Image (spheres, rainbow, N blue to C red):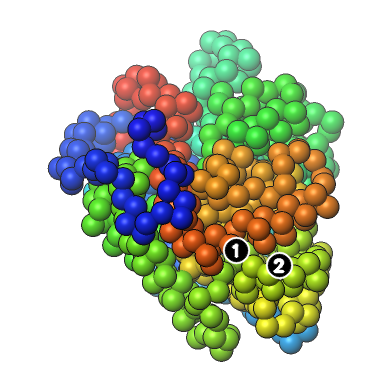
Amino acid sequence: MSSSIPISGEVGGTLRGEMAGFVAPRRQPPEQESAGLAGLPRIAYFSMEIALEPSIPTYAGGLGILAGDMLRSAADLGLPMVAVTLVYRGGYFEQKIDEEGRQVETPSAWSPESVLKPVDARTTVTIEGRRVLIRAWCYEVEGIGGHKVPVYLLDTALPENDDQDRTLTERIYGGDRRYRLAQEVVLGMGGTRLLRALGHTNIGKFHMNEGHSALLTMALFEEQMRERLPDSSDFLDELQRLRHRCVFTTHTPIPAGHDAFDRDLVSRVLGEKRTSGLEMRGLMPQGRLNMTELALACSHYVNGVAMRHGEVSRAMFPRFAIRSITNGVHARTWTSPPFQDLYDRYIPEWRRDNLYLRCVLGVPLHEILKAHNAAKRTLFAAIRAETGVALDESRLTLGFARRAVAYKRAELMLSDPERLKKVAKRAGPLQIIYAGKAHPADEEGKAIIRRVIERASEFEDDVHVLYIPNYDMRWGQLLTSGVDIWVNTPLQPHEASGTSGMKAALNGVPSFSVLDGWWIEGHGEGITGWSIGEDSRGDNPSSELASLYNKLGTVIAPLFYAKPAGFAEVMRGTIAFNGSFFNTHRMLNQYVQNAYGLELLPSMVKEGDENGT
Ligand SMILES: *Cc1c(COP(=O)(O)O)cnc(C)c1O
């Protein structure tokens, strides 16, 4: 950032605050897709969930959204990538909320047949001694330049399979431990074999997005053992070779988020031979198969999803060199139509290269406010259609939408109603919009939703609290673009990254958040938003709560109501600093540079020709 560009110097200044002399580049001809790219080896990206589009319910939350955004950027940037996930015919679930605030779950079944292309290739895995046949459906993620990234959704619903195996690709994160391990066999081993059956022989890197797919290492190991000449190499060489081909991204600092399976179960599902093979290689420490540790041991590059998360992960797994690549979001997907239009007019290059979003510093503040108000109206119209509630467009509106799980502390903001009412009375009326699903088996998560809704009814005119049911990609886009402030209150250091605040940033919506996850990197006080509490690395809810009410009442609400230009300045700073950086174009470039290893790509070409479909 050049020092001649004032960032926050105009608070309370004119609405026409464009920066003199700051000119966005005009549209440039698109860079030619390199003709040689098709011959390069591919990156194979494995993820338990992928959010492909709003109408395909194959995701539960942030992990799936991130995977989808990664692939959308790979398609935009022309990266030779292919992805594997499970098809989940049963979808996740649709959430309704009854009068008492109880979450009611209805199935979100869908029909892959009517949206996806079948592929001919089949493969098999062995689960509990049974042969399980796997087929796949193909979804193509298409980038702005027409480049396509195929995604294969594995499916075991075949008449050849046993009844219990037919439902292995039915539910996301459903069922018991056995079901989960069997799904992970299908994803990791089945996925690798299916790629081979499809003709993807030239895969340079296998990227495990979270530990669920770690069994792909076993499929690769077995391939290597079959290919090698007798006595040509020992086990350690083989592990070294394997590690060279694998990349692993860990996503959660919470121990329960790391899948681990008892030896008995592993032996039953994988068979005794594979189980003792894992043991012999030291891949089952403490007699358990921990998918994170398996992935760690078998990958040459491992990363957490924000700087702080990398640190926390190194403390959890001190034997491994864990690096960080901070998450991002796919800019085109999460930018509201009014802001897309605004960027198209002022920064036409932004779609191809999100870095240019920093040029928003040259866009007049009144244009930012105008685009935001249009997005706010769109959100409020959608809320009215869904709930019948008419919200007030002139009110400062806070948004909080994320999975209902304890560490996200949805209730924190409402925990002292009297104080919140006082803030609103003094500084101006508030609207608070909540959304988020609880996992069907998470009673604590469901209780959080109930308590938020109970609390909501305790407020009167000055504070209006509303819970929108069925948080999904569509509501994610509407909410992150249509509220005025995006709130996040995780218990440090449990938020690995968080991405919804990045979506908000692309729409000029500042964050008001506890310093955890990505926000430690994205926070500039009064420039991109505001912190709740200090970077204390600890649980200190009372000081966080004091900071929350205090800043809301003395800084944020007064700025919003009395100095719209000052508020718009923060909105613009949010886009320039955070929209330009916390996107998956930047993130993917970092994976290419740091994890996939540019120097490796050309040397792999000789190994085989790419004839993948
Ligand atoms: C973006 C998004 C998430 C992840 O957001 P976090 O900030 O990580 O909680 C989860 N669910 C949906 C529907 C989203 O759009």
Question: In the figure, 535 relative to 344: above or below?
Answer: above
Q: Amino acid at mark 2?
A: Val
Instruction: Give the camera-side residue of 517 and 274.
Output: 517
Near mark 2 (Cα within 10 A), the count class, few <14, some 14-19 or many ≥20, is many
Could you tell me which residue is drawn at 30 percent across and 60 percent down? 342
Q: Is residue 329 left or right of residue 367?
A: right
Q: What numbered label is drawn on residue 423?
A: 2
Instruction: Tell me the residue at 19%/38% (across/down).
Output: 31
Report the number of discs. 2
Secondary element type, mark 2: helix
Front-lying residue, 443 or 483: 483
- Which residue is under mark 1? 557
Circle 1 sits in a helix, a strand or a loop, which is it?
helix
**Which quarter of the rendering shows the N terminus?**
top left
Q: Determine the CA span between mark 2 and mark 1.
A: 9 Å
Pointer 2 and pointer 1: residues touching (CB < 8 Å)? Answer: yes
Which residue is most to the left? 29
- Number of the label disc, if any, that sits on residue 123: none
Would residue 42 be visible to someone looking at this image?
no
Q: Position of residue 50 (x, y in %)?
A: 51, 55
Determine which quarter of the picture holds residue 138. bottom left
Q: How far across and down, in percent of the image, does residue 543 sit?
A: 80, 49
Chain-order first, disc 2 or disc 1: 2
The reply, left or right, for residue 268 in relation to residue 204 is right
Residue 333 in picture, x, y percent from top left: 40, 58
- x%, y% of residue 441? 77, 65
Q: Is mark 1 within 8 Å of ligand 1?
A: no
Residue 312 seen anywhere in this rendered image of the structure? yes
Q: Residue at x 72, y 47 (%)?
A: 533
Q: Is residue 571 left or right of residue 452?
A: left
Q: Looking at the image, is 390 positioned above or below residue 72?
A: below
Whether the residue under disc 2 has CB within 8 Å of ligand 1:
no
